[in-house]
Amino acid sequence: QKEVEQNSGPLSVPEGAIASLNCTYSDRVSQSFFWYRQYSGKSPELIMSIYSNGDKEDGRFTAQLNKASQYVSLLIRDSQPSDSATYLCAVIRGQNFVFGPGTRLSVLP
Amino acid sequence: EAGVTQFPSHSVIEKGQTVTLRCDPISGHDNLYWYRRVMGKEIKFLLHFVKESKQDESGMPNNRFLAERTGGTYSTLKVQPAELEDSGVYFCASSQGNWDYNEQFFGPGTRLTVL
């Protein structure tokens, strides 16, 4: 079992819809979770961090964390074509990141 | 404020040659990390500096890889001699010193191709 798992996609949603990206992790002691967005050929860009169970909202983005289920998700409301990218889930192990393989999101105009 | 910068952006070398990658972290960030993404795989941790000291180098593939961070500022990652499987994108990231909220900021990466 990989430490961080994500559906590779592609996940296709129409413009204006809600995109839901999911991530599971295996290490129960993980405390810090991050979502990065990576456009093709570019560096990962931090979108959200979440440390406590529940929801955290920032603009059109909502991160959800359930430590009991070892599950973290990212919701993108009112999806735009510019949101089309690969979304990486990252979990802290010690002081370093363990990344998932990423989910490719395609927002269709 | 300038972000993390990396040089070069691309490097194409032949098997057996040496390549040195450079990373300049965000000013004031004590933590510097190197990661690598091999084609089709997830981003993998290589090593972590705190200032000039290697905190964790458990992700370094083998002794052909040497990382330094003299003076606790920029860092270099040397691959000598390069092998075909070293091809990939090498990312550098930096963060401030609060472990519990370790938001890392990534550079644009260096794409290394070993022929």
Image (cartoon, coloured by chain):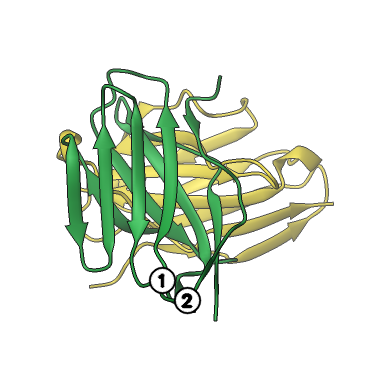
Chain colours: A green, B yellow
Residue type for callout 1: Ser
Question: Where does the image place residue A84, in percent across and percent down from the top left?
Answer: 52, 69
Q: Quadrant of the C terminus of chain A?
A: bottom right
* Residue at x 29% of width, y 30% of height: A95
The disc numbered 1 marks a residue on which chain? A
Q: Are marks 1 and 2 in contact (CB under 8 Å)?
A: yes
* Residue at x 65% of width, y 65% of height: B10
- When asked about the image quadrant of residue B70, the answer is top left
Q: CA distance from mark 1 to mark 2?
A: 5 Å
The vertical placement of A72 against A12, above or below, is: above
Question: Where does the image place residue B14, in percent across and percent down from the top left?
Answer: 82, 51
Q: Quadrant of the N terminus of chain A?
A: top right
**Circles 1 and 2 on the same subunit:** yes
Which residue is labeled 1 in the image?
A79
Residue type for callout 2: Glu
The disc numbered 2 marks a residue on which chain? A
Which residue is labeled 2 in the image?
A15
In the image, A2 versus B76, the foreground residue is A2
